[in-house]
Image (cartoon, helix red, strand yellow):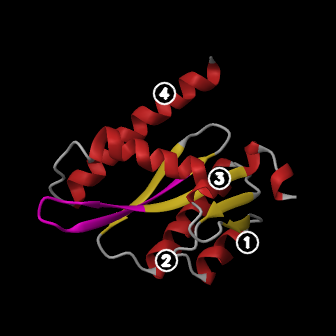
Amino acid sequence: MFLRAPADGLVAIDFFHVGTISLKRFYAAFVIEHRTRRVHLFGVTDHPTGAWATQLARNLASDLVDTGQRFTHLIRDRDAKSTAAFDGVFTSIGIHTVLTAPRAPRMNAFAERWIGSLRRERTDRLLIINGRHLRHVLDAYVKRHNVTAATKATA
């Protein structure tokens, strides 16, 4: 069933971290749509918890309902921040959560590739000062990525 699901119904979520010049680590969460490769940045924090991730899931679910987008499957890894409450949010709006196998980043390849591109093109080349600076850098990168993805989709 999952393998037959069209790309229109797939969305992947992932978390990644970025270090600052003061050696503080910040965590960010994003969602990528498989069909369009459109990325949505959902949050940046220095203390990620299950409650934080669940609130991000609620925000995403609310956005999906408000915009009328219909996804059927959410791909995510087995991160400890993704609790049962996190999955429950998506179940409540009809999205089936698909867990990747342990230590299998290729199962969430679109998200992992986007993180790699972000690191190569931005965060590995910049000295991030603080969380606000990181959020600005990520917002600019997501905006540029989405314009590029939209251009490729219409070509």
Residue drawn at x 28%, y 47% is 123
Q: Main secondary structure of the magenta part?
A: strand
* Span highlighted in magenta in the image: 16-31
Looking at marks 2 and 3 on the same chain, the residue that comes earlier in the sequence is marked by 3
Residue under label 3: 11
Secondary structure, mark 4, is: helix
Check if residue 29 falls in the magenta segment: yes
User: Residue 111 at what x, y percent from top left?
Assistant: 54, 51
Q: For this rendering, which residue is in front, 92 or 151?
A: 151
The CA distance from mark 2 to mark 3 is 18 Å
The CA distance from mark 4 to mark 3 is 19 Å
Check if residue 103 falls in the magenta segment: no
Residue under label 2: 81
Residue drawn at x 32%, y 76% is 47
Secondary structure, mark 2, is: loop
Horizontal side of 51 relative to 99 (left or right) equals left
The CA distance from mark 4 to mark 1 is 32 Å
Residue type for callout 2: Lys
Residue 148 badge: 4
Residue under label 1: 91
